[in-house]
Image: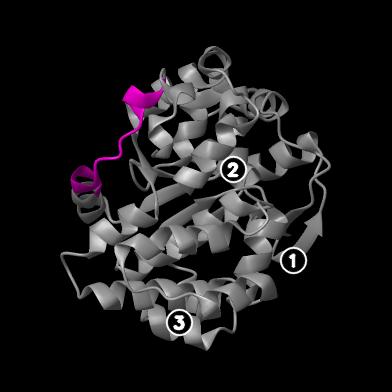
């Protein structure tokens, strides 16, 4: 059964498309896309009253992609459709009114590419990118090296290998699917997550990965980072404020009501100097208002 067919998702199903033809047209029209993990979906749900302002951060594209694994995670601890409806209905309703929401899977990636190149080339690219993306996880790499990927029916095996033990699985898939789409000349890819271990640590492994750059057809990391962009919740807040005309009082009120985690260590630069520290809301609002801070993750 496909994830979107789960009875738990009945109320939100009309807001999320699995139409590959429409997705293909949207990606070709807009190129850029946002890939969301469960942490960001939860943040947006909790900030439903601030959602119109938060959506100002997502101005590069109307295309929102949610991996099937992430959607599964969203209802893992909400096992009934009634509870899921109470929890997520309003979020997906409002998101779909402003954005194009698509569920994306291994099969989606294959369908997007199968008309443009030979089948075996698709499978080879998937395996090669997976080997580069997860190179620091020896369990995944060992299983990938033993995996024969030569037909559509092999895709569930690849999915299961990347799932691994389930920890940070959604984050692995938003990164992997983003790489696959960049490989198909879409992008920039905006990877929306607050997960330092699952997303930022993986990003750091890409810095000197020339094999990855060669597969993607980019010259170096500087070129890569223009196509593969991380968006933490703090960065989303900064962009929301920068893309609207808020007064000083409105900025402070927005930040204080945003639900941001003041104890989370933020990677940022302040007046050109790099830091990796916690930021209290008062300073966060002040530095954004004064345009002194640039948040990376």
For label 1, the residue is: 273
| Crowd band around label 1 with a 10 angstrom C-alpha radius: few (<14), some (14–19), many (20+) | few
Q: Which mark is residue 36?
A: none
Nearer the observer: mark 2 or 1; the answer is: 2
Q: CA distance from mark 2 to mark 1?
A: 18 Å
Q: Quadrant of residue 199?
A: bottom right
Q: Quadrant of residue 102?
A: top left
Residue positioned 57% across, 30% down in the render: 75
Q: CA distance from mark 1 to mark 3?
A: 28 Å
**Position of 92 relative to 113 (above/below):** above
SS label for mark 2: helix
Residues at discs 2 and 1 in contact (Cβ within 8 Å): no
For label 2, the residue is: 238
Q: Which residues are magenta?
A: 12-23
Residues at discs 1 and 3 in contact (Cβ within 8 Å): no
Nearer the observer: mark 1 or 3; the answer is: 3
Residue positioned 36% across, 78% down in the render: 124
SS label for mark 1: strand
Q: Is residue 219 at all visible to an observer of this figure?
A: no
Q: Is residue 13 magenta?
A: yes
For label 3, the residue is: 213
Q: Is residue 268 left or right of residue 276?
A: left
Q: Upstream in the sequence, badge 2 or badge 1?
A: 2
**Which quadrant: the C terminus?**
bottom right
Q: CA distance from mark 2 to mark 3?
A: 29 Å
């Amino acid at each position: 059964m496909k994830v979107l067919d789960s009875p738990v998702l009945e109320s939100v199903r009309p807001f999320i498309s699995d139409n590959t033809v429409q997705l293909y047209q949207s990606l070709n029209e807009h190129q850029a896309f946002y890939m969301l993990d469960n942490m960001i979906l939860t943040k947006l749900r909790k900030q439903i009253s601030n959602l119109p302002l938060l959506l100002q951060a997502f101005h590069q594209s109307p295309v929102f992609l949610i991996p099937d694994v992430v959607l599964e995670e969203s209802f893992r601890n909400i096992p009934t459709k009634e509870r899921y409806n109470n929890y997520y209905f309003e979020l997906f309703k409002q998101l779909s009114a402003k954005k194009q929401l698509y569920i994306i899977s291994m099969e989606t990636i294959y369908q997007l590419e199968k008309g443009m190149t030979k089948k075996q080339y698709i499978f080879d690219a998937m395996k090669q990118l997976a080997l580069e993306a997860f190179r620091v996880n020896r369990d995944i790499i060992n299983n990938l090296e033993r995996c024969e990927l030569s037909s559509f029916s092999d895709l569930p095996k690849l999915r299961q290998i990347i799932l691994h033990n389930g920890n940070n699985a959604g984050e692995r898939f938003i990164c992997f699917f983003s790489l696959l789409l960049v490989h198909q000349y879409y992008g920039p890819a905006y990877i929306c997550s607050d997960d330092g271990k699952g997303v930022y640590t993986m990003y750091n492994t890409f810095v000197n990965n020339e094999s990855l750059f060669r597969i993607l057809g980019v010259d170096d990391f500087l070129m890569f980072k223009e196509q593969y962009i991380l968006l933490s919740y703090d960065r989303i807040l900064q962009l929301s404020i920068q893309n609207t005309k808020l007064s000083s009082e409105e900025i402070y009120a927005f930040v204080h009501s945003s639900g941001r985690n003041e104890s989370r260590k933020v990677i940022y630069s302040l007046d050109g100097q790099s830091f990796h520290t916690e930021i209290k809301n008062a300073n966060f609002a002040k530095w954004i208002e004064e345009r002194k801070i640039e948040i990376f993750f």
